[in-house]
Image (cartoon, coloured by chain):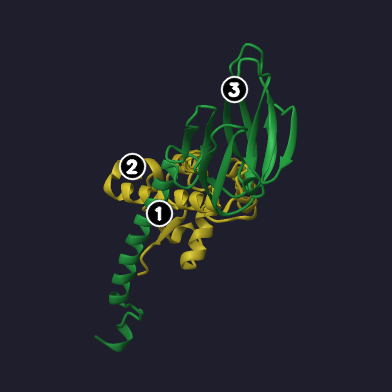
Amino acid sequence: MSSVLRGLAVFAVLLLIFRISGKRTLHQTTTFDFVLILIISETVQQAMIDNDNSLTNAFVLVCTLVGVNIGLSLLKRRYPRVNKLLEGTPVVVIENGTMHHDRMAKERIDREDVLHAAREQHGLRNMDEIESAVLERNGTLSIIPKKQD
Amino acid sequence: MAESDRLEVDQDLRFQQRDWTFERAGWIGILAVITAALLGFLGRGVLSDRTHEAADRSLQIEYGRFERHGAAALLEITLRRRAPGDSSVWLWIAEEYLDGVHLESIAPQPLTQRSFGEQTLYEIGLESGADSARVTVSFTPAKIGARDLRLGVAGAQPLDLSQFVYP
């Protein structure tokens, strides 16, 4: 019983912490994000396993974590409010060529991030070629280029 | 449609249909494992925690019907005073059971301990005035599978229990 409860507790705490940390935190694994994930998993595993190194415990924990994940995905599909709560909403940061500086500041994105995404996705050279940019729920920046005449 | 417009995807909906069925069945399996674990079928929990008493009430034990290999486990044993003048009670546990566990501690510590045939005997002291003593045996199961747990108070009726140790 306690394995399931420990798994649930860790899942809930991590969900909350990553939700607080914002969309951009783990969207792409930079070197630092990688280190962060390593340290977090190392710290959390102690709490989850709690001196029970049996195979059964590992199996139950994996089933709990995956099961909660499946359960939440079903809930998210069914209830849009749950989806918003857990995943957040996309944010338009450039609209018809105008930057929303306030939104970018809140999401901690700068010009460089937008240009990076623009180069990567469409091979764009500068801001003038961008029509819109959207920060998606998973933290990626989607760039929509201006139509070529 | 021109050949160049064709969407080149290796789609196999019949296979995918079966794949989805397999997936849903797996979800039910996961749910079953979580439910079993919550109920205590895969380790400690409501279904696992048992209390048994010898027919002559000489001993009562709380133990886990389902334990896990290498995970800390307990036997909580209550021993009753046999005769008014006794200052201790002899508890025995079958050697066969003790062979399959790493015994960590017995608290309170037995006054003496001796091996006798297929049993290990522990002399447990009784507080004057108290008519029973509570003993906690801490151990970690070291053998996997069904285990027979035989124990009792010397000269009284034994208890025959079984445990299952998951890997």
User: Compared with residue B51, is residue B162 higher up or lower down, i.e. above or below?
Assistant: below
Q: Colour of chain B?
A: green
Which chain has been coloured yellow in this picture?
A
Instruction: Determine the residue positioned at 54% across, 27% down.
Output: B58
Q: Nearer the viewer, residue A54 or B49?
A: B49
Does any portion of residue B167 appear in the rendered image? no
Q: Is disc 3 in contact with disc 2, using a CB cutoff of under 8 Å?
A: no
Instruction: Determine the residue positioned at 28% across, 76% down.
Output: B14
The spot of residue B66 in percent (x, y) is: 50, 45
Q: Respond whether the residues carrying marks 3 and 2 are from the same subunit.
A: no
Point out which mark residue B82 bears. 3
Point out which mark residue A82 bears. 2
The spot of residue B69 in percent (x, y) is: 59, 50
Q: Respond whether the residues carrying marks 2 and 1 are from the same subunit.
A: no
Q: Badge 1: how crowded within 10 Å, few (<14), some, or many (20+)?
A: many
Q: Badge 3: how crowded within 10 Å, few (<14), some, or many (20+)?
A: some
Q: Nearer the viewer, residue B88 or B61?
A: B88
Cα–Cα span, label 1 and label 3: 50 Å
Quickly name the residue at label 1: B30
